[in-house]
Amino acid sequence: MNALQSLYDAVSASDPRIVDPLATVSRSGTNTVLSLSVLVSGDEPVSTQTLTAVLVAARNSTVPFDQLDLNARSAADSERLLDLRPAIDGLPSGVTVLYDGGLTIMRGDLDRL
């Protein structure tokens, strides 16, 4: 099984609402960036619990990366980007996340989850 498939399996298993993850790995300067997009089923907002489960699944995958870029879209309307701000606000203090419609988190902060 390749590393991206194991990532997809782990992210899908992290929460029953997460479907159809898609990822790419690229370089940005000296960083290896994992760009991950997930579809989220249901009408409820993404919770901190769901966000943390996805982040931990990505962190624990065999895909090597320094930075994770994550976006979440509605499974019912894949054009609609979901607001992750309320879920981000519930992450532990000391975990730095950049958010501009998509979430960016560095490996060191992922290791604090």
Image: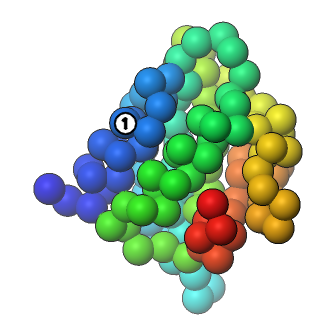
Dot 1 amino acid type:
Ala
- Residue 72 position, x and y percent, is 62, 35
Q: SS class of the residue under badge 1?
A: helix
The quadrant in which residue 105 appears is bottom right
Q: Residue furthest left?
A: 1
- Residue 61 position, x and y percent, is 37, 61
Residue sitting at 39 percent across and 36 percent down? 12
Up/down of 5 relative to 76, above or below: below
Asked whether 37 or 59 is in front, the reply is 59
Up/down of 90 relative to 96, above or below: above
Is residue 67 among the parts visible in the rendering? no
Asked whether 24 or 40 is in front, the reply is 40
Q: Which residue is mark 1?
A: 13
Is residue 104 among the parts visible in the rendering? yes
- Residue 41 position, x and y percent, is 53, 17
Residue sitting at 27 percent across and 61 percent down? 3
Query: Horizontally, is 82 left or right of 67 in the view?
Result: right
